[in-house]
Image: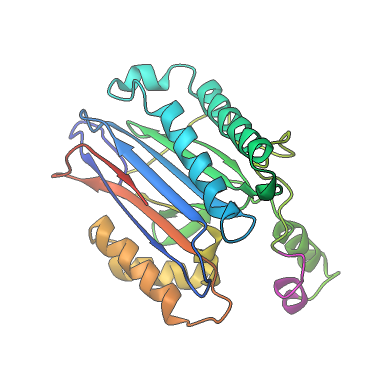
Amino acid sequence: MLSFFKTKRNLDISSKINRGARDYQEDAVEYYIPEDRHSAVVVLADGLGGHAAGHVASSIVSDKVMQALKPGASDSKDLQKNLRKKLKMAADKANEHVRMHMEANPETEGMGSTLLATVIISNYLYWISIGDSPLYLFRKGALKQLNQDHSMAPKLDALVRKGSLTKEAALNHPMRNSLLSVVVGDSFKQVDCPRKAFKLAKEDLLIAASDGLQFLSDEEIEQTLERVNDKSSEKIVSALMKAVLHKKSPYQDNIAICVLRADDCMNGVSHTH
């Protein structure tokens, strides 16, 4: 429940991160709730580039974006002012730092990261995303991805709908997870940063994640959420992580999940994975 209306409920946020079947962790997730507890910032990054570089890239992106959005967050009105511009400037700042790191460390050339940054103020949601890290809304038993997927997956799925490709061929296509836009120190090919805030309703649940969560189908995510929708964010994020790991896929990617809802007993907190 991410609504503040007359009761001004406090945000309840929890996150978990897991290496999956990989030998190293390239995902990063941070969240921040100011003392007034009427707003929150979540930043998630999925690194690319191998053992050292992917981790470095996601750390740079998550840290720089959080630094850009966190100052002044104790005042919700200050945070909301020119927010779309702030989100884009935060992404540009992270992109510039990735570029500078590669210039100073040539061995990390080619590293990069996705970016998903969300800001919640009162019952309004703002975001910027670059790459394929999904932002889900779970409302009245239905799961919906709010942000754009900047990978080949939507294009392949469109071919399935047209009858030009079978569903199996699309799901197993070698280019399915190829990113069309990413934070790599160069200009962004695609950026999803809506001009208008998304209005949240009572009992809405938000899930920010890396694409490792998508080893579960949308139906499997919905079924998991149905079982724990009335629980705390900690129990919800634990249930999602357990469901992913239960599949025991030998190809399981890193998994980062952050669940956001409302609660009546949450204190101001900052958290990093």
**For residue 187, which quarter of the picture?**
top right
Residue displayed at 31% across by 66% down: 238
What percent of the width, then of the height, locates residue 26?
52, 57
Q: Residue at x 45, y 27 (%)?
A: 68
**Is 169 part of what is drawn in magenta?**
yes
Pick whichever, 75 or 64, lies toward us: 64
Q: Residue at x 64, y 42 (%)?
A: 105
> With 220 as the anchor, is 47 left or right in this view?
right
Outermost residue to the left? 265
Which residue, as the protein is rendered here, is positioned at the far right?
164
Colour style of the rendered protein structure: rainbow
In the picture, measured across the screen, residue 1 lies left or right of residue 209, that is: left
Q: Which residues are magenta?
A: 167-176
Q: Position of residue 200 (x, y in %)?
A: 39, 40
In the displayed structure, 138 sits above or below 36; it is below
Relative depth, front residue between 43 and 147: 43
63 and 135: which one is in front?
A: 63
Q: Is residue 118 above or below residue 46?
A: above
Let me know if residue 204 is in the magenta part: no
Q: Report the number of discs.
A: 0
Residue 215 visible in the displayed image: yes
Can the viewer see residue 126?
no
In the image, 11: left or right of 102? Answer: left
Q: Position of residue 12 (x, y in %)?
A: 25, 47
Q: Closest to the observer: 94 or 181?
A: 94
Q: Residue at x 79, y 76 (%)?
A: 166
Q: Residue 173, position in %: x, y?
A: 76, 72
